[in-house]
Amino acid sequence: MRFTLSHIIDGAPVGGAATVAIVNPSDTGDIVAIAPTGDADDMLAAIASAQAAFGSWSRSGLIERHDILRRAAAEMMDRRAELGALLSREEGKIVAEGVGEVLRAAQTLEFFAGDMLRLGGEAGPSVRPNVSVQVTREPLGIIGVITPWNFPFSIPAWKIGPALAWGNCVIFKPAANTPACAYEFVRIFLRAGLPPGVLNLVLGRGAAVGDTLCRHAAVAGVSFTGSVETGARIAAACAASSPPKRLQMEMGGKNPMIVLDDADLDRAVEGAVSGSFYSTGQRCTASSRLIVTPSIRKRFVAAMVERMAALKIGHALDAYSQIGPLASADQLALVDGYVVAGKGEGAKVAAGGGPLVCRTPGYYYAPTLFVDTAPGMRIARDEIFGPVACVIEASNYEHALALANDTSFGLSAAIYTESLARAEHFKRNAEAGMVMGNLPTSGADYHVPFGGRKASSFGPREQGATAREFYSIVKTAYTYASPTV
Ligand code: ADP
């Protein structure tokens, strides 16, 4: 089945003259959808529609918003097999991960449906006599949500869920290569009873529609997940707009996973395989630097190579596949470019190392493990965003910690050790927003904050109760009342 997609502006489908074919990365002969590529006028129409809707939506009752979020969550849960298969077909992650992601999106919406009911404030006396003070939160306004393709259901859920829960209107600009998931996501909200204009979808390239969104004066905030380079462009566009916009950005990582001599080897290998290669390594939390101390290094590498030989790479919708293809031809070229560079810089390939041919033509890549990696090599410094990990040797725990922190990123960091003292020390000293003990760097919960430090993140944390810091704005109200009546 081939979907014909449209923008969704003011609750209605809007087509466009220019279209693009969305190819299944597992089978390039399969066209998943035909999607319009929007322009600045489409974006301006969406913003106008959100402006018109904001007045009544921002004043809507909590229960109306709560019920809409819960109905959207329920439909996602009910349709998770179908939507998960669509996600796998469009993005390329295996269907078990696709279904899991749709379920996760539904759970995230459920969380925010509950969190919005805990909306509270503060009330207290003023420093001045007969004056009272109230601190409350109000909707921020019109919010631009710009998302990448690697989690086309769960990232929109953790941005759009709290945005709507807190009474904001949203312009949703998904990645150009996953429009079908975004289209289904928005239609579910409309069926759940969301009024027209509250959530608008504009499809197309970031440089055209995304940039218009970031520069528009009526947009109060932009929440973005994507690459560091795009983040810099978005930040510049938002800074140039007047009034200034609130900005939240999540931009990848080069996440270290330390394996100390005393680690549970089987658990560390399982963690490294899932952290580095599942979702085809296309996660900002992927474990890409495996920092290993001397006594366990040989056993760790041997066990990794053996375990990797058993991995089944194939079509995302085949039940036996454990790892699907990369998401696009561009990603394949990028990842392969890094692997070639790694070989050129003198790192050795212990497993994988190139594209794979499977039963259908697709963007398949062998999970790749580099050894003899020096910390200064490009493969050890840049985010590759593919199934590539490098083993870096550390002489001891202190050296491992220094290597782990020697990066411009700071999203997630993991340690495998049986020593409580070292695990605690690492928890305190890792320069990362998320720290994992005997767990891979990937795999975050939806009810607690998600985000990083340094070049990985900017602005308030996403998810959990901290989401409100971005999606609402504080008002401090003072009232004088005469002490006599
Ligand atoms: P990814 O490759 O992970 O999708 P990108 O950073 O390339 O990461 O893109 C993330 C999102 O940002 C996409 O929706 C993309 O279309 C959008 N985008 C790209 N360039 C711009 C821009 N100049 N302004 C606004 N959004 C952009």
Image: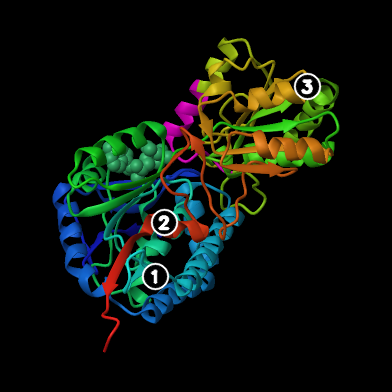
Pick the residue in front: 132 or 461. 132
Q: Which residue is mark 3?
A: 396
Circles 1 and 2 in contact, beta carbons < 8 Å: no
* Position of residue 171 in the picture relative to residue 414 (left or right): left
Q: CA distance from mark 1 to mark 2?
A: 24 Å
Mark nearer the N terminus (1 vs 2)? 1
| Residue type beneath disc 2 | Glu
Position of residue 98 measured from the top left corner of the image (x, y, whole percent): 55, 55
Q: Is residue 366 magenta?
A: no
Q: Which residues are magenta?
A: 324-337
Residue 437: quarter of image: top right
Residue 50: quarter of image: bottom left
Q: Which residue is mark 2?
A: 469
Figure disc tally: 3
Q: CA distance from mark 2 to mark 3?
A: 40 Å
Q: Secondary structure at mark 1?
A: strand
Circles 3 and 1 in contact, beta carbons < 8 Å: no
| Residue type beneath disc 1 | Pro
Residue 25 — which label? Answer: none
Q: Is residue 391 above or below residue 456?
A: above
Mark nearer the N terminus (3 vs 1)? 1
Quadrant where the C terminus sits is bottom left
Q: Is residue 70 above or below residue 469?
A: below
Q: Which residue is mark 1?
A: 125
Q: Secondary structure at mark 2?
A: helix
Pick the residue in front: 186 or 169. 169
| Residue type beneath disc 3 | Asn
* Position of residue 333 in the picture relative to residue 245 (left or right): right
Position of residue 52 measured from the top left corner of the image (x, y, whole percent): 16, 68
